[in-house]
């Protein structure tokens, strides 16, 4: 019991000390290693709307790129593992143990063990999904040990007790203010990316072949890869784009829409769909419009469904009485919801709230050409973006 309490305290400290999601994952890997020692592991944030990973943090793996390739094949390939993380997401418990075969040969048919765990020289694995109180998944992970060192029932119970705390860490660090050093880094990155973007007009499009090689990458798309921290789209190197492509192939013909945040604090929408009958997947990147991120942002701030509805009405410029009429509640109830929203988002007025949520979506486009629907036309050259604050 005392160990479980100390682990929870360690997770809370990891959340408090992290300037952003990347540092949070590093901190959590340290904390988990202190209480549940492991020989190799991985944590990945996911977009809760589509539950696909958008980044990776690994420990103790000699060839993390190969691990990612194997994981992508098992989780999102044409013959997905029946015991995949995707299946675990829909089970009451968010933790599962994959172990080496016992004396009766049990486990020999487990694809994940045969093709991933044993190939890495490991004998045991824990698969983890991190869901908040609303059952939304914000991250996934795995911890592995060498043969002969299985995970105990007590360790599983201790981890199961903090899965929600880790999920909330994924959620809250998504929108956290960066430290002064990170802000300086981000300002430099924004300036550099603006210069690069101005030299790369046109659409940001990536086409992945059926073999997961990059068939085509526009210059503008390569800029987004850099800004997302995905590195350069290199042939044969797996990453988040490949995970999304596998998910699209699995759910064909349904396309995927993934909301991401760049290293310098801007929201972007990635859309992916099957390109033709050969299994090629086309992806496009574009700056997110405010309506496309409101649901993600409200979830990240921990707003209730009713508070989210009030927020949407506020962003539409409606008064307290108008909101009350539209939502069939009293003006006093609207005011109570607004107070809760202000507290959770760290502002003290409607004006500050709208500024916080909207400025990163409109100010970078200010001065650009408009489309017939009133939104900015980003298909061609536009004026240099105005410096904008980040959400947080």
Image: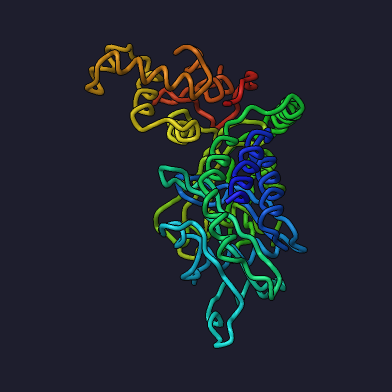
Residue sitting at the far bottom: 104
Residue 276: tell me if it is visible: no
Residue 283, above or below 78: above
Q: Position of residue 210 (x, y in %)?
A: 56, 65
Position of 121 with respect to 268 (left or right) is right
Q: Position of residue 232 (x, y in %)?
A: 71, 49
Number of labels in the image equals 0
Could you say where residue 377 lies in the image, as x and y percent from the top left?
A: 50, 28
Residue at horizontal 69 percent and vertical 44 percent from the top:
27
Q: Is residue 87 visible?
A: yes
In front here: 383 or 253?
253
Residue under the point 58% across and 86% down: 103
Quick check: 303 above or below 214?
above
Q: Position of residue 381 (x, y in %)?
A: 60, 28
Quarter of the image where the C terminus is located: top right
Q: How is the image coloured?
A: rainbow
- Residue at 66%, 58% (x, y): give it: 238
Left or right placement of residue 56 versus residue 363 in this view: right
Instruction: Please state which of residues 59 and 99 is positioned toward the viewer in this rendering.
Output: 99
Q: Quadrant of residue 126?
A: bottom right
């Amino acid at each position: 019991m005392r160990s479980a309490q100390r682990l929870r305290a360690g997770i809370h400290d990891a959340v408090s000390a992290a300037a952003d999601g990347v540092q949070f994952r590093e901190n959590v890997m340290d904390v988990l290693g202190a209480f549940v020692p492991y020989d190799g592991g991985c944590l990945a944030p996911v977009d809760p709307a589509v539950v696909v990973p958008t980044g990776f943090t690994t420990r103790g793996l000699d060839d993390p790129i190969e691990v990612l390739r194997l994981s992508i094949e098992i989780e999102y390939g044409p013959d997905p593992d029946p015991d995949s993380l995707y299946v675990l997401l829909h089970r009451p418990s968010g933790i599962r143990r994959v172990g080496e075969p016992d004396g009766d040969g049990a486990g020999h048919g487990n694809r994940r063990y045969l093709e991933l765990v044993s190939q890495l020289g490991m004998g045991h694995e824990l698969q983890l999904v991190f869901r908040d109180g609303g059952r939304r998944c914000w991250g996934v992970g795995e911890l592995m040990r060498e043969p002969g060192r299985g995970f105990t029932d007590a360790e599983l119970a201790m981890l199961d007790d903090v899965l929600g705390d880790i999920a909330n860490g994924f959620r809250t660090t998504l929108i956290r203010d960066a430290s002064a050093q990170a802000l300086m880094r981000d300002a430099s990155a924004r300036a550099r990316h603006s210069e690069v973007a101005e030299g790369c007009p046109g659409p940001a499009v990536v086409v992945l072949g059926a073999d997961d090689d990059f068939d085509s990458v526009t210059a503008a798309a390569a800029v987004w890869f850099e800004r997302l921290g995905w590195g350069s789209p290199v042939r044969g190197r797996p990453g988040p784009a490949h995970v999304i492509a596998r998910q699209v192939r699995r759910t064909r013909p349904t396309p995927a829409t993934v909301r991401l945040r760049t290293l310098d604090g801007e929201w972007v929408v990635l859309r992916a769909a099957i390109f033709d009958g050969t299994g090629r997947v086309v992806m496009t990147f574009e700056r997110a419009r405010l309506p496309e991120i409101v649901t993600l942002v409200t979830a990240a701030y921990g707003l209730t469904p009713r508070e989210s509805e009030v927020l949407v009405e506020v962003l539409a410029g409606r008064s307290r009485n108008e909101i009350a009429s539209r939502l069939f509640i009293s003006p006093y109830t609207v005011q109570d919801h607004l107070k809760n929203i202000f507290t959770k988002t760290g502002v003290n007025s409607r004006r500050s709230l709208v500024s916080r949520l909207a400025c990163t979506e409109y100010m970078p486009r200010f001065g650009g050409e408009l489309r017939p629907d009133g939104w900015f036309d980003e298909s061609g050259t536009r004026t240099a973006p105005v410096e904008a604050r980040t959400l947080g």
